[in-house]
Image (tube, rainbow, N blue to C red):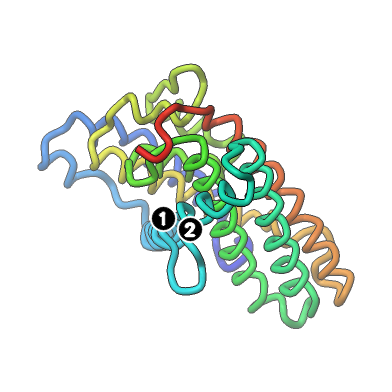
């Protein structure tokens, strides 16, 4: 059993089983789709995580601005220079991640049961918005379901290729943004998103964010900031790779 009561192995197995059902959801009848297996108690957690990332991380809620607004602001500050806007987006989100990582790691072991879950969700929300804003600046339509799934895939890093492989999906040119060209039906995208959610839960369950000494007061805050900045930098670099420029921004 891993962090937050989530078994990472169970989550990974659920992700693999779910990914293999993507094609069935795409090609089967409504009755066949209804028979797709439920992967146990993790299903609700994976669904809630994905919904939160899409609804808040991309569309924004309350004080958390939408990815589209972040993209527009960055372009304005960059005077229309797309690549400079992306650098601004990555810089600003690394700063947010540093603050979140420091604050949630500051209290050490005694506050970890409360602070770490908050940091994990905050990290993924920041990573989602950073990726989606990068995609928007490069010209992608964030209202397109396939692009939203591609944004989620970016968060899984190296696991993304394995998810797509098990789902029987070939990303044209190796870019996940090419999912848009495949025009997967909504039921298949929902299944794919759930598989991504399981993989993200597996990472949480594997205590990815809990190692490196976060149990030590003050030092845990510094290390938490460093780790989150490093991981957001990796996600930002992957986002720039997976969403190459298109000539449709603002249309």
**Above or below 165: residue 1:** below
Residue plotted at (52% across, 49% down): 71
* Disc 2 element: helix
Count of numbered tags: 2
Place of residue 137 in the rendered image (x, y in percent of width and height, measured from the top left): 51, 41
Q: Position of residue 160 (x, y in %)?
A: 53, 35
Residue 110 place in picture, x, y as percent:
76, 82
Residue at figure coordinates x 39%, y 60% from the top left: 55
Q: 168 and 60: which one is in front?
A: 60
Residue closest to the far front:
79
* Numbered badge on residue 198: none
The quadrant in which residue 142 appears is: top left
Of all residues, the one furthest to the top in this rendering is: 173
Indicate left or right for 239 with 232 as reference.
left
Q: CA distance from mark 2 to mark 1?
A: 5 Å
Q: Which residue is mark 1?
A: 54
Q: Which residue is mark 2?
A: 57
Give the residue displayed 81% in from the left and 71% down from the top: 215
Mark 2 touching mark 1, by CB under 8 A? Answer: yes
Residue in front for this viewpoint, 58 or 206: 58
């Amino acid at each position: 059993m891993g962090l937050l009561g989530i078994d990472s192995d169970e989550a990974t197995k659920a992700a693999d089983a779910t990914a293999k059902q993507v094609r069935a959801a795409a090609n089967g009848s409504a009755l066949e789709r209804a028979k797709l297996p439920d992967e146990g108690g993790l299903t609700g957690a994976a669904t809630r995580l994905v919904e939160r990332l899409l609804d808040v991380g991309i569309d924004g809620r309350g004080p958390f601005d939408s990815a589209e607004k972040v993209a527009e602001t960055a372009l304005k500050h960059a005077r229309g220079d797309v690549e400079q806007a992306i650098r601004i987006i990555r810089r600003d989100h690394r700063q947010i991640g540093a603050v979140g990582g420091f604050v949630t790691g500051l209290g050490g072991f005694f506050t970890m049961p409360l602070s770490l879950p908050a940091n994990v969700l905050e990290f993924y929300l920041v990573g989602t918005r950073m990726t989606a804003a990068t995609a928007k600046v490069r010209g992608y339509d964030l209202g397109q379901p396939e692009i939203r799934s591609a944004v989620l895939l970016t968060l899984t890093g190296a696991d993304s290729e394995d998810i797509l492989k098990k789902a029987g999906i070939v990303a044209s040119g190796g870019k996940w943004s090419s999912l848009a060209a495949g025009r997967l039906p909504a039921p298949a995208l929902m299944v794919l998103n759930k598989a991504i959610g399981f993989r993200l839960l597996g990472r949480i369950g594997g205590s990815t964010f809990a190692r490196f000494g976060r149990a030590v007061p003050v030092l845990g805050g510094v290390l938490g900031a460093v780790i989150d900045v490093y991981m957001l930098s990796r996600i930002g670099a992957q986002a720039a790779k997976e969403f190459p420029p298109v000539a449709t921004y603002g249309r």
